[in-house]
Image: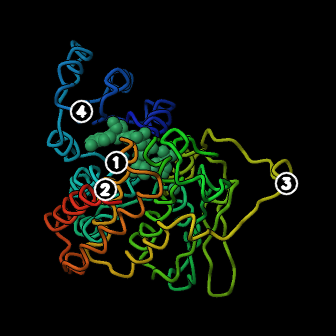
Amino acid sequence: MRRVSIFGATGSIGQNTVDLIKRAPDDYDVVALTGGGNIAQLARDAKDLRAEVAVTCYPEKLPQLRAALAGTGIEVAAGDAAIAEAAARPADWVMSAIVGAAGLVPGLEALKQGTTLALANKESLVTAGPLLMGTARTHGATVLPVDSEHSAVFQGLIGEDIAAVERIIITASGGAFRDWPLEAIASATVADASSHPNWDMGQRITIDSASMFNKSLELIETKEFFGVKPDQIETVVHPESLIHALVGFNDGALMAHVGPPDMRHAIGFALHWPERKHLPVDRLDLAAIAQLTFRAPDDARYPALRLARDVMEIGGMAGAAFNGAKEKALDLFIGEKIGFLEMAQVVEGVLNRMDQQNCLRNAATDLDTVQAADHMARKIAQELSATV
Ligand code: NAD
Ligand code: MG
């Protein structure tokens, strides 16, 4: 029996993970499940999977969770500290699928137990890549990528020497507005940005796909995870979302990972690694697909890509500032306080201001420094939102 925990169990990645675990309940001992406001889902899964503890991030929801699990013997808890405590419970495999920088502390706590961390929460690598990967090394823990592109690269590198890698190409669907006229994007609504052409995901990552902030996080994630240089990382728009990434080697060969847009592949790969096991994903019929297309990303349409390049060049706290500013700008867009294109303006303004104040080119990698940069970025983003 493998002891497993799922952080962000009620979300899109979390539910896909629950689906895979439910298919083989006798193989797993479920330690912790965490969620947010969807208490009914959290309680149902905790019961079905006979979890040891269920945690909601919202303290005010604790009575509801307690009532839903009364008499089951399942422990209940609430709040950020309780989530961190649940992450510190020994487990063999932990899914990190909280959305946003809130996933960082639980991820670090899990790594300190020497676990295998399946990392969907790309924000923690962008915010604190050296801290996260360093913590894994110190504690003999393993980090496996769950983002589909990074899982694809990881699979392309099996048996290969990273020194023979010339470039990594991360594909992008182009998101909801890839075919919109540029002028129309300025007035795009939250509803417009919340539907993805190919993937069914949480609302925040779906909007980030439309702006390509998601892709910019993924470029930084590639640098932090695989340790390659920024100029070795490319992106190409691939509207079909069937090739997830390609690895280019020094002999000119490109190894592509091709699969249906179903996150249960990347999640299942991480769950069974280093073995491969049967997964319930569609098998592609290439003749029916007939063609795959590619186009260069347009910098005017996707300013977030240029900002990601700046962040990778600056290093230090630029990732923490970028992600914090991006999360705040996204909150403001969802709250209809700023327009779609103003998100990138706000983030760029935050990076400029923090660089002028010498807050980015910082050699420290500890959690306090990271969290201070994240908080400062959110505060400046709020200020700047009044001026865009
Ligand atoms: P989601 O919004 O569907 O789910 C997020 C989960 O995190 C929920 O369980 C929610 O209750 C919990 N949560 C939200 N805020 C929290 C907080 N402050 N503290 C603790 N828990 C909190 O998101 P998702 O689409 O499943 O994405 C999860 C992560 O996986 C993100 O980092 C995202 O970038 C990444 N990811 C998602 C997909 C996808 O297909 N959905 C693909 C690749 C990567
Ligand atoms: Mg991805």
User: Residue 303: x, y in percent?
Assistant: 49, 67
Residue 349 is drawn in which quadrant?
Answer: bottom left
Q: Are marks 2 and 1 in contact (CB under 8 Å)?
A: yes
Give the foreground label among 3 and 4: 3
- In the depicted view, which residue is nearer to us: 67 or 162? 67
Q: Is residue 287 left or right of residue 50?
A: right
Q: Earlier in the sequence, mark 2 or mark 1?
A: 1
For the N terminus, the image quarter is: top left
At x 46% / y 49%, what residue is drawn?
A: 205
Q: Earlier in the sequence, mark 3 or mark 4?
A: 4
Callout 3 secondary element: loop
Q: Which residue is tagged 2? A: 385
Under mark 1, the amino acid is: Leu
Q: Is residue 153 left or right of residue 40?
A: right
In the rendered view, would you say 146 is above or below 20?
A: below
User: Residue 41: x, y in percent?
Assistant: 38, 24
Under mark 2, the amino acid is: Ser
Badge 1: few (under 14), some or many (20 or more) residues near its Cα, within 10 Å? some
Q: Which residue is tagged 3? A: 290
Give the foreground label among 4 and 2: 2
Q: CA distance from mark 3 to mark 4?
A: 46 Å
At x 81% / y 50%, what residue is drawn?
A: 289
Q: Is residue 161 left or right of residue 290?
A: left
Q: CA distance from mark 4 to mark 2?
A: 34 Å
Q: Earlier in the sequence, mark 2 or mark 3?
A: 3
Badge 2: few (under 14), some or many (20 or more) residues near its Cα, within 10 Å? many
Q: CA distance from mark 1 to mark 4?
A: 27 Å
Q: Is residue 327 left or right of residue 215?
A: left
Q: CA distance from mark 3 to mark 1?
A: 41 Å
Disc number placed over residue 332 in the picture, else none = 1
Residue 132 is drawn in which quadrant?
Answer: bottom left
Disc number placed over residue 55 in the picture, else none = 4
